[in-house]
Amino acid sequence: MEEARRRQMCLSYVLLLAISSLACVLASDADTIFYEPFDEEFSGRWIVSEKDEYQGAWKHSKSEGHEDYGLLVSEPARKYAIVKELEEPVNLKDGTVVLQFETRLQNGLECGGAYLKYLRPQEAGWVPKGFDNESPYSIMFGPDKCGATNKVHFILKHKNPKSGEYVEHHVKNPPSVPSDKLTHVYTAILKPDNEIRILVDGEEKKKVNILSADDFEPALIPAKTIPDPDDKKPEDWDERAKIPDPDATKPDDWDEDAPMEIEDEEATKPEGWLDDEPEEIEDPEASKPEDWDDEEDGEWEAPKIDNPKCEEAPGCGEWKKPMKSNPAYKGKWHAPLIDNPSYKGIWKPQQIPNPIYFELDRPDYEPIAAIGIEIWTMQDGILFDNILIASDEKVAESYRQTKWKPKFDVEKEKQKAEEEASSASDGLKGIQKKVFELLYKIADIPFLQNHKFKILDAIEKAEKQPNLTIGVLVSIVVVFFSVLLKLLFGGKKPQTKVTAEVKKTDAAEPSSIQESDEKKDDSDDTAAPRRRTVRRDD
């Protein structure tokens, strides 16, 4: 009996857990208004604009290093436009609405956008195949970067009920765009209490109040009063706080014509000054080019160079006394300034009631009927993925954890490994640079002059192919010690022998002397090793 009760309780617990899990799933599905993972080909579901200026080709492509697909911007320096209609318009006036999507700038982003436009219903005057930058939207959200612009936009397009005009209201001081090539997720949470929170990778970067004039530019609610456009400044209105003293007079000893600088009469010519030497002379080593034609090119003149004699002397050419500040200089006289008795302050037009002023407790959001991507970019490789509209923040968080986070962690680890490898490579390059500097110094050692050009040639090859550095270093060290040992143990006697042979063939032709020199080199290369062998036998 007791065993049956335990089984019944366990069964009830399992059933309750299953119902709870099912309820969570159903609730999650209920809170997910729209979700696009791009697991399947987008053609037929997303509509590409047929406007002539939008020539960029969209592709269904995998994110680099993943099996996950996304919507790819495949060509640089193009305009792109594509739109997805929602089954039902999304009402932004009631409850919480969460907008979220991922972008990955696989080739970076120097100049271009990667934002989404949440479009109004087509009754506002647009069609999917004619989607362009003029298509009316309710919200624009996402990264944009070009020149001085580097921001995650949040723009609300709101209708002024008095004027009927739609005005773009931009979040002030928006977050900046991450500068790496990783997948990032952007989230905008619109709350019923007028609060808007902007998250990047799940971290809150900005929190604003949609009705606050401090948070949006221009403010959603206009000023109550405005300057009267018909008000004019009176002709006798004096805005000068200070005026020249009308009673002031210029002093009798004030000389306006005195120069700012005068010659220093106390200066003397430095000893050793070369009066007859010009500062520049014709380059004595220059010669007229062989292809110079006096008739076509004119009379050839040697280029000028600094006179080397002037470098050792205080100066050359005609000596002139230097200038100095004139103690009598006062400049043009001006009357001193005094307070203006007629000063009335800076004129401003009078304030009048603003004819388009209105008040409201909640923004009059336009519904979202479609999601569009309309961008111009200089970079390709921009990948959009996991576009979500939800009515619960927890749904967006769940998608971040299950869809975005695993990809980001893999990419972050790969980036870290690449940075470490790059750091190690930079350290190796620094070592190689020092090695090359040492090799060039070795090449300049006097007793290696006969081998200098071969050594320099080997160094240059190693610089072009860093993997040869160690081999070249070993080769040069071998040459260094070979020549050093030759000088210490085997260089003198063969040199005397060859010299004697040259003397015997004193009457020989120059070519014979050249051959003797070549034999001398060969003798030098072979004699030393033989003598070292004899010494080791001893």
Image (spheres, rainbow, N blue to C red):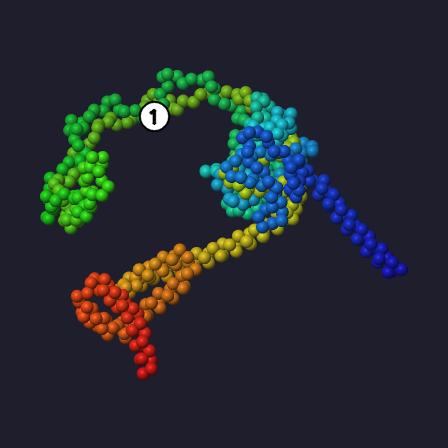
The residue at the far bottom in this view is 538
Asked whether 392 or 60 is in front, the reply is 60
Is residue 191 at all visible to an observer of this figure?
no
Is residue 473 at all visible to an observer of this figure?
yes
Asked whether 426 or 118 is in front, the reply is 426
The residue at the far front in this view is 508
Q: Which residue is mark 1?
A: 241
Give the residue displayed 46% in from the left and 38% down from the top. 147
- Name the secondary structure under disc 1: loop
Kind of residue at badge 1:
Ala
Asked whether 402 or 54 is in front, the reply is 54
Residue 461 lies, in percent from the top left, at 38, 57
Question: In the image, is residue 359 above or below residue 203?
Answer: above
**Badge 1: few (under 14), some or many (20 or more) residues near its Cα, within 10 Å?**
some
Residue 47 lies, in percent from the top left, at 63, 33
Residue 53 lies, in percent from the top left, at 54, 30
